[in-house]
Image: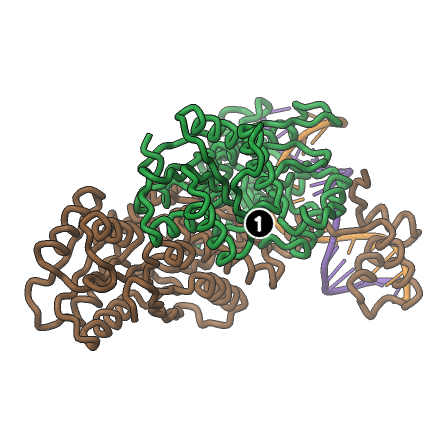
Chain colours: A green, B brown, C purple, D orange
DNA sequence: CTGAAAGCGCTTACAG
DNA sequence: CTGAAAGCGCTTACAG
């Protein structure tokens, strides 16, 4: 066991002062080449690593970013995190992960802890419960303490923070329009997340594209069995030709209904959904999906935060970036 | 903006010394009730939070745990992380997440960075590349610096560290035995991870259960198209009655083959695989699976690390915990 | 070119 | 019961 060596110990071994050692290791021009070399050599020999905690205290920053994730089992968020981690790594920043489990209470705890200055900045996707109850005091607390906050993914909220999201509304507007242009008449929508912001935006996009039609064929419910029944209704009774699914659950249920009812996909029913590639490709039939580029979203979120930390944005003015989605057609649409 | 108040400022406002304030806030018996109250009142008023960086420097610890994850898109690891986060939160510890992307190079960088003392301990699932190349110097470096390491999930490696994993071998032994007891004759196995440790263990369990049979029907490949062809061979030509899949990819490919070839599941072919519940339940037909209890694994990993940090284990002696898996029967086995 | 000193924000053994 | 002092491991403006 090597047991970390400190600057002080290094200085003693070299018979110079701590300041000299520190400067030498930072390539300060104040130090003579000769001593600089001596210092570096010994430092390397002992594998000296500056204590990051001490450096952080001195520089009054933490080198650390807090990321609040509502649900890590959702592969979208897992991939967002992966993008964040990769980008943070480039800047030698550490990611501290907090999982809110879509709970307001937990989110409050996390933000409260974060006000102590554990991190330089916070990236957060607001939990469903928080959105529903519209309680944002814990976020304002962060802002009060001058900790920059970047809101990612769930951005249709009126909060004074930088935001980076996905073009939820436009994506479904485009998808529905695309189906119409292909000559499809009865285009339906299924959703298990109609009660949360991103769900509402996707539905809105669909509705705009279908403008003029009344009584749009929509199946919405947060309960699996109810949603399934409603989807069956659309598919069997209303004989829709295409179904847009706002989320993983509704997409999978739709696939399931088609399978159970012997409906041919894509011949008789075209399906597309918001669902991750890893699963979409493997389903039978493989499911066409909206690619949201979660990794890019994660990268962009870190970039925005770092720009903010470096004072590249005016304070009081907030950034809002939108990542453009892509339609990916696999077997379930057959295009 | 409140701008964090410090002990010093608090002391000045109260006309007492910094030491008195600090002690008062820690309920030291040295302080008179009167001043203790005054101090606490003002601290509350100003919402004083001790600077965690300073506290950590003083206590020479970080309150932080490094978690190295090979692939966060794998929902197994996402759920492991979720368990770790929950347990760490109970102990007011922070989780710093690092993603190795199954790369040795990246894993080395991470471990190197970690030797600087960024974290109190490390939880790691060794990357595939590292396992293949059997290079573990970066892990020994961590140990050299006296940073405790707990290896999770991928534990069949000869390293002097605490380990916590899943009973991979036994799970498939039990599953194959179960099928045999049900009177099934031709039981096959498919794997896309036959080259890594956990894959090998699962295969071994299967082989042990099938002892006595020669020429076991096995399909293995890391390439999707090749694996699919081999699975088709087992299903169509060799007419196997049941297939054990060691991983997500092989399980999904098997489902796909059955679908494309018109094989009835579970009537003509029973399928079971290592796959997460969220996906298994939604597949058509829903896929029976081995539940690995990833959350529990995450919780246990943190517990072991904390016991180690608290000196509850003898040094030089290592813990090894195994989480027991469970068979979950859904439509694809029909039991 | 080198070093002593102050300071980042705390905690705690020690003196009074 | 209170406070001065030392120290955690660094960085950096300043004096020499």
- Residue A81 seen in the figure: no
Asked whether A173 or B47 is in front, the reply is: A173
Residue A180 appears at what percent x and percent y? 45, 27
Residue D7, relative to residue A186: is it above or below? below
Q: For the view shown, which residue lies furthest in the left direction?
A: B214
What residue is at 48 percent from the left and 43 percent from the top?
Answer: A76
Chain ID of residue with mark 1: A
Neighbours of disc 1 within 10 Å: few (<14), some (14-19), many (20+): many
Asked whether A91 or A251 is in front, the reply is: A251
- Residue B6 seen in the figure: yes
Residue B334 appears at what percent x and percent y? 29, 68
Residue B290, relative to residue B129: is it above or below? below
What residue is at 74 percent from the left and 52 percent from the top?
Answer: B50
Residue B243, relative to residue A251: is it above or below? below
Q: Is residue A296 left or right of residue B37?
A: left
Q: Quadrant of residue B201?
A: bottom left
Q: For the view shown, which residue lies furthest in the bottom direction?
A: B181
Residue A283 appears at what percent x and percent y? 33, 46
Q: Quadrant of residue B269?
A: bottom left
Asked whether B196 or B62 is in front, the reply is: B196
- Tag count in the figure? 1
> Which element type, helix, strand or loop, lies under badge 1?
loop
Asked whether A296 or A65 is in front, the reply is: A296
Q: Which quadrant holds the C terminus of chain A?
A: top left
Residue A241 appears at what percent x and percent y? 40, 37
Q: Is residue B182 left or right of residue A86?
A: left
Q: Is residue B19 left or right of residue A142?
A: right
Q: Which quadrant holds the N terminus of chain A?
A: bottom left
Q: For the view shown, which residue lies furthest in the front direction?
A: A237
Q: Which residue is mark 1?
A: A70
């Amino acid at each position: 066991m090597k047991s970390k060596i400190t600057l002080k110990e290094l200085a003693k071994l070299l018979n110079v002062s701590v300041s000299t050692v520190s400067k030498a290791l930072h390539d300060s021009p104040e130090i003579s080449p000769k001593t600089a070399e001596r210092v570096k050599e010994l430092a390397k020999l002992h594998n000296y690593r500056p204590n990051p905690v001490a450096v952080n205290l001195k520089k009054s920053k933490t080198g650390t970013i807090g990321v609040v994730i509502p649900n890590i089992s959702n592969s979208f968020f897992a991939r967002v995190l992966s993008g964040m981690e990769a980008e943070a790594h480039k800047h030698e920043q550490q990611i501290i992960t907090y999982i809110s489990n879509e709970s307001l209470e937990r989110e409050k705890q996390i933000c409260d802890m974060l006000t102590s200055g554990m991190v330089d900045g916070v990236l957060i996707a607001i939990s469903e419960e928080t959105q529903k109850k519209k309680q944002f005091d814990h976020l304002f607390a962060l802002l009060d303490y001058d900790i920059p906050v970047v809101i990612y993914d769930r951005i249709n909220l009126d909060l004074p923070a930088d935001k980076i999201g996905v073009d939820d509304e436009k994506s479904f507007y485009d998808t529905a329009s695309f189906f119409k242009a292909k000559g499809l008449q009865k285009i339906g929508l299924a959703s298990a997340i109609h009660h949360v912001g991103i769900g509402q935006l996707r539905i809105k996009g669909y509705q705009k594209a279908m403008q003029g039609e009344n009584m749009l064929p929509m199946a919405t419910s947060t309960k699996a069995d109810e949603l399934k029944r409603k989807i069956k209704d659309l598919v069997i009774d209303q004989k829709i030709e295409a179904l847009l699914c706002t989320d993983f659950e509704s997409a999978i249920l739709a696939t399931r209904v088609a399978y159970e009812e012997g409906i041919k996909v894509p011949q008789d029913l075209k399906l597309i959904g918001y669902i991750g590639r890893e699963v979409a490709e493997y389903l039978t039939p493989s499911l066409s999906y909206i690619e949201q580029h979660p990794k890019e979203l994660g990268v962009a979120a870190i970039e925005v935060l770092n720009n903010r930390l470096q004072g590249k944005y005016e304070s009081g003015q907030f950034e809002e970036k939108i990542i453009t989605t892509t339609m990916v057609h696999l077997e379930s649409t057959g295009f």
